[in-house]
Image: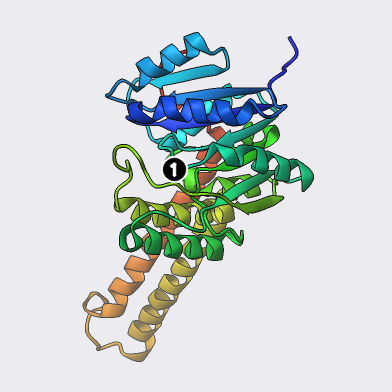
Amino acid sequence: MQNTVEISLVIPLLNEEESIIPLHQWIFDVLKKEVYSYEIIFIDDGSSDGSWEIISDLAKSNSNVKGIQFVRNYGKSQALHAGFEMATGDYTVTLDADLQDSPEEIPLLIHTLIEKKLDLISGWKKKRYDSILFKNLPSKLFNWAARRVSGIYLHDFNCGLKAYRKEVIKTIDVHGEMHRYIPVLASNEGFNKIGEQIVQHQARKFGQTKFGADRFFKGFLDLITLWFINRFGKQPMHFFGLWGTVMLLVGFGFTLYLGIDKLFLNTQARLITDRPEFYIALTLMLLGSQFFIAGFLGEILLRSQRPNKRYNIKTQI
């Protein structure tokens, strides 16, 4: 059967029972004015409130609505990954379920994506309705670091509003907490036509944010991980082997110096084991050997890895 869906809306959520119906109505009001056929995919990431019951009711009354329910909370990245797997549209738009992302931006993002022939376009919440101290300033620092490390000039890497071509979402692997770096993941896979568009940001109407201050610390750690994987992920021996070689050579140099000094220059000097150079040499040679082993293990794992599922679905409609 030929696919007739043009736009897939992927919406991850956690305990957003108050926002789902207003969001659904908002999306319906916007897209009924457009010529695009669409589907709405809600991913319930282990909610403990009535979110899934609301999604189920919407799916019964609207054939455009689909849903995935996780058995527990796995995180936004896993929810997006599941939504991307289910999506059938030629273009996919992601947005958050807390009503802070405006569905009115959807046609504009799709239009820009098509007109400029981009692989993906990311929203930029230039004017934010968040705490300046706890969200805005850390976000600016985080985005600055992401630009420096990735080489991708975006103002708002973590904006939930993004639009993608189908080929992008079916290629990238979003896991852990890498949803912040989807543009970087896409670029690493060869999708380098990345754009940015200013979008509206709404003040939160219901509930509280599900992300704490620790998300910025985790984000920086993930950024370092992404940089390392991008640089050395395909050939880990290039990193571990290089530093292992340096440590072994320096350690061997100290060992050679100690041996020559003891045998030919200062034969009456104190024992080699009493000299600090001995322990420096021993430590460096041990570390160098371990780095080599880590490199070998990394190469073996890289060649034997198999895709594995990072979440369990309880219900799918």
Neighbour tally class for label 1: few under 14, some 14-19, many 20 plus, Cα within 10 Å: some
Is the image coloured rainbow, by chain, by secondary structure, or in one colour?
rainbow
Residue 85 on image: x %, y %? 57, 25
Residue at image location 43% in from the left, 40% down from the top = 176
Q: Quadrant of residue 2?
A: top right
Counting the numbered discs, the total is 1
Q: Which residue is mark 1?
A: 100
165 vs 139, left or right, is right
Q: Is residue 198 above or below residue 298?
A: below
Q: Is residue 258 shown left or right of residue 118?
A: left
The residue depicted at 72 percent of the width and 50 percent of the height is 193
Query: Residue drawn at (36%, 15%), measured in percent from left and top?
Result: 53
Q: Is residue 91 above or below residue 201?
A: above
Q: Foreground residue, 118 or 131?
A: 131
Q: Nearer the viewer, residue 308 or 41?
A: 41
The answer to whether residue 307 is visible is no
Q: Position of residue 129 (x, y in %)?
A: 40, 54
Residue 203 in view here: yes
185, 123: nearer the viewer: 123
Counting from the top left corner in percent of width and height, residue 221 is at 40, 55
- Image-quadrant location for residue 161: top right
Q: Quadrant of the N terminus?
A: top right
Rendered position, 93 above or below 83: below
Q: Residue sitting at 49 percent across and 60 percent down?
A: 143
Give, as a three-letter code, the residue at label 1.
Gln
Q: Secondary structure at mark 1?
A: loop
Q: Estimate the x, y position of residue 311 in percent, counting from the top left.
A: 42, 25
